[in-house]
Amino acid sequence: MDLNSVDLIVDKYQEKRTALISVLHDVQDRYKYLPDEALKMVASRLRMDINEIYGVATFYKSFTLTPQGKYSITLCLGTACHVRGGPRILRELKGLLKIEPGQTTADRQFSLNVVNCLGVCAIGPVMMVDQKFYGEMNPIRAKRMIEKLNNKRTGVKS
Amino acid sequence: MRKIKSVSDLERWREVILSKQNQDGVVISVCGGTGCHAYGCKKVREEFTKVIREKGDLEKIRLRFTGCRGFCERGPIVTIQPQGIFYQRVQEKDVPLILSETIEKGKILEDLLYEDAVTKRKVTSEKEIPFYKAQDRLVLGNNGLIEPTKIEDYIGIGGYQALAKALFEMKPEQIIGEVKASGLRGRGGAGFPTGKKWEDCRKVPGDIKYIICNCDEGDPGAYMDRSLLEGNPHSVLEGMIIGAYAIGGSHGYIYVRHEYPLACKNAETAITQARKAGLLGENIFGSGFNFDLEIAKGGGAFVCGESTALIASIEGRVGEPRSKQVHTVSRGLWGKPTNLNNVETWANVPLIINKGSQWFSSIGTEKSKGTKIFSLVGKVKNTGLVEVPMGITLKEIVFDIGGGQQDGRKIKAVQTGGPSGGCIPVSLFDLPVDFDSLTQAGSMMGSGGMIVMDEGTCMVDVAKYFVHFLQEESCGKCLPCREGLKRMGEILDRITEGKGNEEDLSLLNELAEVVADTSLCGLGKTAPNPVLSALRYFKPEFEAHIHQKRCPAGVCTPLIQYSISESDCTGCGACAKVCPTQAIKGEKKQNHIILAEICSKCGSCKDVCQANAVMVQ
């Protein structure tokens, strides 16, 4: 694994321990997750105990220690999305992808995540595919979206 | 960009900006809030840019990409000035027409206008739309007038004049006096008097003091802080600089949720611009006052909205709260005196300094002054951000502004205060909305989420939702919150699965009391509120789950069954097509039936049935 980027990130924050969360954000932006090797490097560069780094990395929900799938599916389950049927969409997604929230499909195509509020409450239920928001979702639309992404991958025209 | 070294520099700059703006013939504003983004506003803007460039003769058009306009449900929103035309649900394909018809010929495009739900009349201007009519958009209104990434726009509408006034015409004590007299209370949830907090922090001895803006908007269902920081970041900066001057702060942080990338970006841009203009950094305005700011990103932990946890997070640690025997105003960030306020609170400060405490305190109720932004969402027709004077009734917000029920089901409650608040039943909708009345009703103001619930919402399920939410977000430091919420969640799980018994309710009450009394921080102390308020106002729903094993709202899956009404079914087959488990049988144009044993209760059949024949019991 190329850890040059980790060096550059730590340099950017002048090896400040207090910048740990920002460092982890940047590392995750670069690798899409927090690889063990990268965390070890952060620990040595910031002269911190690796346990402390893991403590922070596992406390905050934004961080993930496992590699993510090609497509990241994020479902909002904030109150507004919940009362408008968010849990029904979750059930559909779990059934379709055969994974639980926080997991990635065996073929590394989809990661399913659930968040407590994306802050787009007026158009809920909201689902985010990679960085794009989709409002007024329902199980049927969610299913079609997954099928479309699957078809894109296998080259089948929908 | 010029460096501002005095008040007259600012004035001169503003004059130049205004005279330039006067040369703009038409201003087309495309809303760039996150809601409108989801509906494709970026494409609309790109199309405007493209077509305007192609036409070439439309030089006098200024295209503006504003922050959130509030009426998110109607996005993408496009407004045209000076005509004051309000177009909604604008798509890429509408752009050439808007330019050729409305801009060139002055013709209004009826299809893009808002239709009043009651009168069925098409409405041309924003002011006539009921959603906006009853609002008082003192803080949020400027979002529509400026492009958040252009400091010139903010200066043009009188930005940084309050800072000039504060630095050159007022002493720090006077500023604190004004904020105290205004009656401004913290918009983050608890409603602590802002001026008092500032005074306390100023009085603490120390040469380094920190100023923090809390934009860790974690309450699910609330997004006004996001929209303010995204749409008008300079107003937040100006408030913070004034606060820093009054308190004696030298450095500040804006703590932003990681989930809000645009807010981070716009705030970052605003900080850079303000620094370049001499409004931030050393010798601000040539006054000799120094203050600088930076952004700290959150990591997606709800508990970090709590001040001591937030501070721990800025320090790069795990966001666990500490006991508040010593307040953060005395010992906060890195052990130094720290003043923390919420985004909306900071954005109110320039208004108070500009217009005076007397003006501000004339708005609102006796103990809650000014306006409050609410995010009106859930099962209501008009969803979005609304800013109203304190003291307005829930009825006015939900029915006059919100337009009432969404899809034929009666509204039964509104949830305020997020996971620390509670559900207020429709019978109390005459309640004036302010800090104290909501607390009395068993809920709280919170950061301003207002989630409307109707007959299709199960209150037991909502109580369960919040308990699980908090259980997951509990940092685990203190036992009552960590274990108590877990047990409360288990009881509620049992009830919604039809396995509840009579004793569960009293046990739930008892646990709630213990968690509230003995938890360390605000998260645990207020955590039982959603359960207690649901038990207080909606006990019959709990009893129906326990005794009759029935979910009256048709939500709790173990207790419901889907069926198709013989008299309403048209035999179109749409339901059978979407059923993921092939549980629906029936010939074309014949009655369809649902096989209960293989039905997964996903509800997709109900979503697609045009004849409303799918029933939930």
Image (cartoon, rainbow, N blue to C red):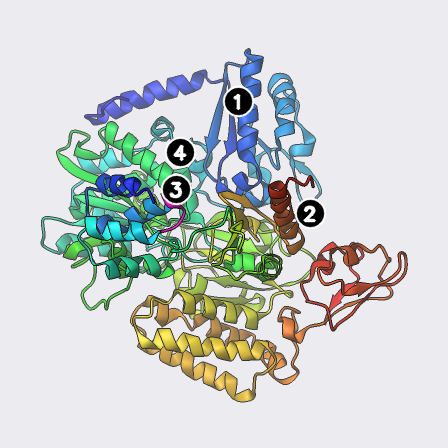
Relative to B541, say whether B74 is above or below: above
The answer to whether the residue labelled 4 contacts the one labelled 2, judged by CB atoms less than 8 Å apart, is no
Closer to viewer: mark 3 or mark 2: 3
Q: Residue B148 carries which label?
A: 4
- The answer to if A30 sits in the magenta stretch is yes
Closest to the camera, between mark 4 and mark 1, is 1
Query: What's the CA distance linking mark 4 and mark 2?
Result: 35 Å
Of callouts 2 and 1, the N-terminal one: 1
Residue B87: give x, y in percent of width and height.
60, 33
- Give the Cα separation between the discs numbered 2 and 1: 36 Å
Label 3: few (<14), some (14–19) or many (≥20) C-alpha neighbours in 10 Å: many
How far across and how far down the image is residue A144, in percent? 66, 48
How far across and down, in percent of the image, does residue B312 sit? 25, 58
Please check whether the numbered discs 3 and 1 fall on a single chain: yes
* Cα distance in 3D space between marks 4 and 1: 18 Å
Q: Which of marks 3 and 4 is in front?
A: 3
Give the residue at mark 1: B49
Residue shown at 54% from the left, 39% from the top = B36
Q: Can residue B337 be seen in this view?
A: no
